[in-house]
Amino acid sequence: MCSDERQATPLQALSAEVVACRACEVAGYLGHANPIRPGLIDEPRLLLVGQAPGPVTDRKGYHFAGPAGRFLDNWLDRAGFPAGYFREHVYLTSLTRCFPGKSPAGNGDRPPSRAEIALCRRFLEREFDLLQPKVVLLVGKMAIDAFLGQRPLTDTVGRSFPLDGRVYLPLPHASGVSRWLNAPANKALLEQALSELSRLRVELSL
């Protein structure tokens, strides 16, 4: 081995496994698997779980590459985090790692099935084990339901949930086409969520 070669870290090894995965393709859920490589950041301070990669992420190859990433970046700014924090210190992941494709009904992306989520769950569990996050941001109803059980967004957004030694903070789907945020009452819940995130930032030295 050359002197400048180094053994892969556990996160690097996991990243390679994610990229090599073809489980959903083999099972017939996807015509072509294109798992998104986890972003390897130096100092992950938050873990963020979304639903699934979208078409822009599928094309560019990194999580939240589309409009949702810009919204999330802005939300963290509003919660008092420094500029650039979203890409530098937030470990971005999702329930599934491949773009599920467009909805057959023609209204947005197809939500991943329970079977697809189950096939990817091992990756998510290992990320939690390796990173041991203090705070987990759950973005969108599918991610929230996966960890907190099924309930309306109005019952979760604006609150934080201590569970298993960490804090889960639900956020609505970060998309410019999300109709949920059109309602003034729901916008107020988002502001409550960002205020709670700001509190956690200070309290936990995030």
Image (tube, rainbow, N blue to C red):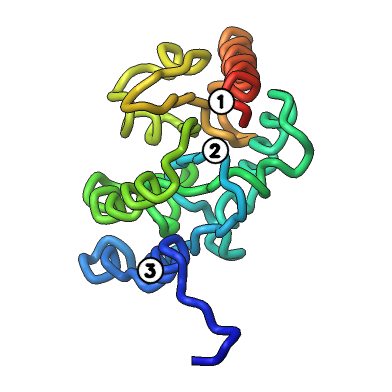
Q: Nearer the viewer, residue 49 or 176?
A: 49
Are there few (<14), some (14-19), or many (20+) residues within 10 Å of tag 2?
many
Q: Is residue 73 above or below residue 145?
A: below
Q: Which residue shows up at 27% across the image and 61% down it? A: 29
Mark linked to residue 179: 1
View extreme (right): residue: 83
Mark linked to residue 33: 3
Q: Secondary structure at mark 2?
A: strand
Q: Secondary structure at mark 3?
A: loop
Q: Is residue 33 above or below residue 107?
A: below
Question: What's the distance in space between the residues labelled 1 and 3, CA to CA?
Answer: 30 Å
Earlier residue among tags 2 and 1: 2
Q: Secondary structure at mark 1?
A: loop
Residue 34 in view of the camera: no
Are there few (<14), some (14-19), or many (20+) residues within 10 Å of tag 1?
few
**Residue type highlighted by circle 3:** Ala
Question: What's the distance in space between the residues labelled 2 and 1, CA to CA?
Answer: 27 Å
Residue 91 in view of the camera: yes
The residue pinned by badge 2 equals 46
Q: Residue 46, position in %: x, y?
A: 54, 38
Q: Which residue shows up at 56% across the image and 25% down it? A: 179
Q: Residue 111, position in %: x, y?
A: 37, 44
Q: Nearer the viewer, residue 197 or 94?
A: 197
Q: Which residue shows up at 52% across the image and 32% down it? A: 173
Earlier residue among tags 3 and 2: 3
Q: Tell us which disc is closer to us: 3 or 2.
A: 2
**Residue type highlighted by circle 1:** Arg
Q: Tell us which disc is closer to us: 1 or 3.
A: 3
